[in-house]
Image: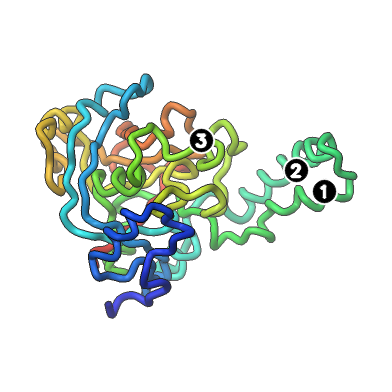
Amino acid sequence: MSWAEVVERTPNATVITDAEWRQRISATGLPWRVRDRVSGVEMLLVPPGEFVMGMSPGDTDAMEDERPAHVVRITKPYYLGRTELTQGQWSSIMGYNQSFFQDVNYRIISEHEAPRRVATLMLGGMTREEAERQAGAGTLEATGASQWPLETITPDELRPYLLKTGLRLPTEAEWEYACRAGTRTPRYGELDAIAWYAGNANGRTYPVGQKAANALGFSDMIGNVWEWCSDWYSDTYYGDCENGATDPQGPGEGKPAYFRVARGGSWDHVEKNCRASYRQNHYMPDPRVTDFGVRVARDP
């Protein structure tokens, strides 16, 4: 593939531990792990397959628009960002960075959190010197803005980036298929282990890839920032798909969709909103909100 550098051709068994998933990826004949040459985004291959989209069995937090659960067939392989798009990946192409959690805003937040982190570490047995050193590990200088997720971004603002790079937004079905990675539970792991959300994020984003990945190797699919999908939103669309759907693209603009769909929850949202099937639908296509980001996709 001329657009990508191959990082690992065959699926790494320490990342994708399920042999069936490895076989399905290898059966496509495409490399598993690649790096987009233009954007620098690392991407993993998602093979074709079938899954149940929507409400997980027994999920008491499920909303009406997550019902009915229905079978979806994904017929073509696609690549998806291993992490959320970072500020560095964005600014290297676009030449600017409109994200809120950078520079002075991040410094203020870090300085505000530091005394609490020091006190907590000292209660755990560290000396003050050790605690202050450890607390400083989350500062701007240590993490680097290039690794924080891009946020405060709209679908319209993403359009020129996608045109320049040849990347695209995933469909809502592609997003959930990759997020679930074969699971039918509301999340692919214990929430604190896999996500930055309102219960542990202390009011900010975090550098990508710090939390446990799912069974396909994707990090932060739950939490950190919401991830825009290409679909328009309709609260009745799942009813239209109750007998199954193949490569669904969403209802289309104005049918009666007036909102874009975003998925995955964020640093600012509570546990019940950080689930594989939860559909964020409360914002018009052009909000500039500090917890909306993106995970890009690409066709092989």
N-terminal of the two: label 3 or label 2? 2
In this picture, residue 287 sits left or right of residue 136 = left
Q: Tell me where residue 108 appears, x and y as whole percent.
A: 68, 46
Instruction: Check whether the beta carbons of the residues at disc 1 and disc 2 lie within 8 A of each other.
Output: yes
Q: Of helix, strand and loop, which one carries label 2?
A: helix
Q: Residues within 10 Å of mark 1 (few under 14, many from 20)?
A: some
- Checking the image for residue 114, the label placed there is 2
Instruction: Tell me if I can see residue 142 in this picture.
Output: yes
Q: Which quadrant of the rendered structure holds the N terminus?
A: bottom left
Which residue is pictured at 34% across the width and 75% down the height?
Answer: 4
Which residue is pictured at 12% across the width and 34% down the height?
Answer: 241
- Checking the image for residue 132, the label placed there is 1
Q: Of helix, strand and loop, which one carries label 3?
A: helix
Mark count: 3
- Give me the C-alpha separation between circle 3 and circle 1: 28 Å
N-terminal of the two: label 3 or label 1? 1
Q: Residues within 10 Å of mark 2 (few under 14, many from 20)?
A: some
